[in-house]
Amino acid sequence: MDNSDLSVGKSETNNPSPIVILVVEDNIGNFKLIARLLGSLGVQCEWKTSGYEVVEFARNLEKIDLVLMDIRLPYEDGYEAMRKIRQSRQFDNIPIVAVTAVAGPEQMKTARLAGFDGFIGKPLDPDRFPEQIKQILAGKAVWEYN
């Protein structure tokens, strides 16, 4: 799959609609890595540093194709932020994937039971992460930790 495979729609000018991923991550270093890896795929990346008010922020975006949600966030954790997003009917079909350093079989099970659509453990593998994102955007679930 090359970058052109990541366009999800066509505009009236027949240009591909860019993929938009909302990254909810409080650590600037982690966000920079994620943004760089997503940028290499030609993906537009939006950033929120906490779960607090994430739904309102997301509503102001033209579109979202995927939410990558850290679990440990200030003010409101990723589980609560995910529940708020799920309550908004506007985001019914958008996958929300936990991306967290609290990674292991129990945490993955907790995330699955809470309603996340996938799980990627940190530290992220820069060689594997782009393929994980491609799989998620293609509608395949990714449940992995290191």
Image (spheres, rainbow, N blue to C red):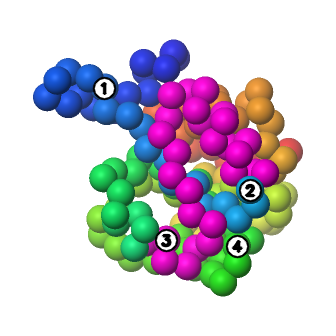
| Category of crowding for the residue at label 3, using alpha-carbon neighbours closer than 10 angstroms: few (below 14), some (14–19), many (at least 20) | some
Q: Of the numbered discs in the image, which one, if any, rests on residue 73?
A: 4
Q: Earlier in the sequence, mark 1 or mark 3?
A: 1
Horizontal and vertical percent position of residue 18: 38, 34
Residue to which mark 2 is pinned: 28
Q: Is residue 6 magenta?
A: no
Q: Earlier in the sequence, mark 1 or mark 2?
A: 1
Q: Which residues make up the magenta segment?
A: 29-55
Residue 85 shows up from this direction: no
Toward which corner of the image does residue 70 lie, by quadrant? bottom right
Q: Earlier in the sequence, mark 2 or mark 3?
A: 2
Q: Amino acid at mark 4?
A: Leu
Kindly indicate whether the residue at mark 2 contacts the one at mark 1 (C-beta within 8 angstroms): no
The front one of 6 and 25 is 25
Q: CA distance from mark 4 to mark 3?
A: 12 Å
Q: Amino acid at mark 1?
A: Pro
